[in-house]
Image (cartoon, helix red, strand yellow):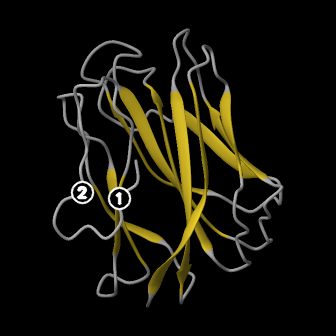
Amino acid sequence: MTIVHVGAVGGANSKAGNQASIAMNVDNTVEVGNAIILCVAKDNINTTFVDHNEFTSVIDSQTNTWTKAVERTNAANAKASTVGAIFFTTVTTELVGATDTITVNFAASNSNDASAVIADEFTITNEIIAVIDSGVAQADGADLPSIALSGLANSEHLFIYGGMKENAGITYTAGTGATLFTS
């Protein structure tokens, strides 16, 4: 299996209160058969460290089928004091064009919501995406979910780490072995 990063699909962010969803415009066309990996982060609703289904679904203008890969809430403190983050994936069956949108729907909102979404396109030769491992958020307000995606356990792997920080005192930097870092 070969995994190739094609490029950014798009992104968006919002600081509006009481958000039910976040939508992003597609900046670059995604060809049929290519994978899109979407990372979304928002202020947490729940206050324990598990998958609370705070993100309910993803839809795009072309009705591709989206699958939740992993969701974690980093709930070190009270509601809206840290973040929940999630990865969704799709292998496109319909072309996603530069005039399309991708929308992530939330299960609940709070008065001081902040959210962000970013998507990247990949070619994966056997068109299989499987979550083979997931990291668990830590209770310090800084650590967020990570996933490893692969078609087979002994094949090439794509490791992705994503999320959102709640305060300006936390800085993320690329470490050794990282081939792409986007902030």
Report whether 23 appears left or right of 15.
right
Q: Are the residues flagged by discs 1 and 2 in contact, CB closer than 8 Å?
A: yes
Q: Amino acid at mark 1?
A: Phe
Q: Which residue is mark 2?
A: 174
Q: Secondary structure at mark 1?
A: loop
Q: Quick one: quadrant of the N terminus?
A: bottom left
The image quadrant that residue 20 belongs to is top right
Image location of residue 160, percent across then percent down? 36, 61
Q: Secondary structure at mark 2?
A: loop
What residue lies at 32% left-to-right and 54% top-to-bottom? 146
Q: Is residue 157 above or below residue 25?
A: below
Report whether 175 appears left or right of 88.
left
Image location of residue 111, percent across then percent down? 56, 8
Q: CA distance from mark 1 to mark 2?
A: 6 Å
Mark 2 is surrounded, within 10 Å at the Cα level, by few (under 14), some (14 to 19) or many (20 or more) other residues, namely few
Residue 181, label in figure: 1
